[in-house]
Amino acid sequence: MPNLNSWLPRIIAAAFVACIVTSSVSAQQAPTVRIRGTIESVDGSTLGIKTREGSDVKVRMTDNVAVFAVVKTELAEIKAGSYIGVTAMPEPDGTQKAIAVHIFPENQRGAAEGFRPWDARANSTMTNATVAQTVGGTDGQHITVKYKDGEKNVVVPPDTPIVTFVASDKSEVKPGAKLIIFGAAKKDDGTLEANRVNVGRDGITPPM
């Protein structure tokens, strides 16, 4: 019969490793919060934001924060092969009616690829995918987009906001600017931290 004392150090070591792995996984899966709103103050790396819902939050930007300006562009910039994000409302026939489209820079191709529920409006969706085909129609541009698990047919009405991301710096981050933070990490002490902020340039409200 094995001597328990000889196994005890191994059991303790295994438990210790399991604890570290669990803690690491928990840290990697820190909950995130999507924030839309207006910058009200900038105090060093801390932003005071009035959210779309009317609450006041503070978000600390990380030292290596990536700042992107959200700028207007044209529907003509969406071509076969473009990687885009479509904020949309589902139609009864299964198509997605766009309420905003953002064009990703080439170095962000593949970001958050797929189809999912979204919170721009009640029941809205988000599709990040590659444009397979685009054809004009009487009700707007008809775009087929494909992602790793499927495809969607999208109608983009003529008045749909079309924007793109432009890499920028903290000069964009100023009181009065509108922003969206896709995933502010909620730390154990309840504070919020962002490693990317997307700020509307020239008064633009990020439409996604």
Image (cartoon, rainbow, N blue to C red):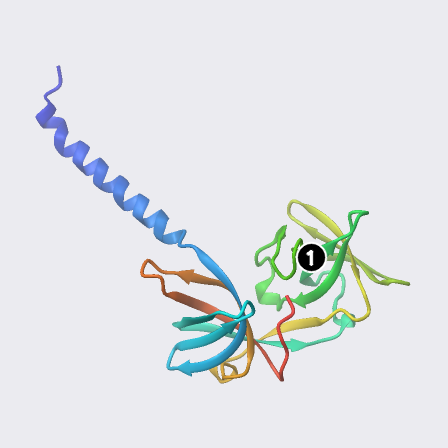
* Left or right of 146 on screen, residue 118: left
Residue drawn at x 38%, y 53% is: 28
Q: What residue is disc 1 on? A: 130
From the viewer's perspective, is residue 37 above or below residue 130? Answer: below
Q: For this rendering, which residue is in front, 99 or 21?
A: 99
- Please identify the quadrant where the C terminus is shown: bottom right
Residue drawn at x 70%, y 65% is: 101
Q: Position of residue 185 (x, y in %)?
A: 42, 61
Report the residue that reaches farthest toward the right.
138
* Left or right of 121 on screen, residue 133: right
Quarter residue 41 falls in: bottom left
From the viewer's perspective, is residue 143 above or below residue 55? Answer: above
- Please identify the quadrant where the N terminus is shown: top left
Quarter residue 134 falls in: bottom right
Q: Position of residue 29 (x, y in %)?
A: 41, 51
Q: Position of residue 156 (x, y in %)?
A: 79, 63
Q: Amino acid at mark 1?
A: Thr
Residue drawn at x 62%, y 84% is: 202
Q: For this rendering, which residue is in front, 59 or 198?
A: 59
Q: For this rendering, which residue is in front, 51 or 15?
A: 51
User: Considering the numbered disc 1 on the image, is that residue within a helix, a strand or a loop?
Assistant: strand
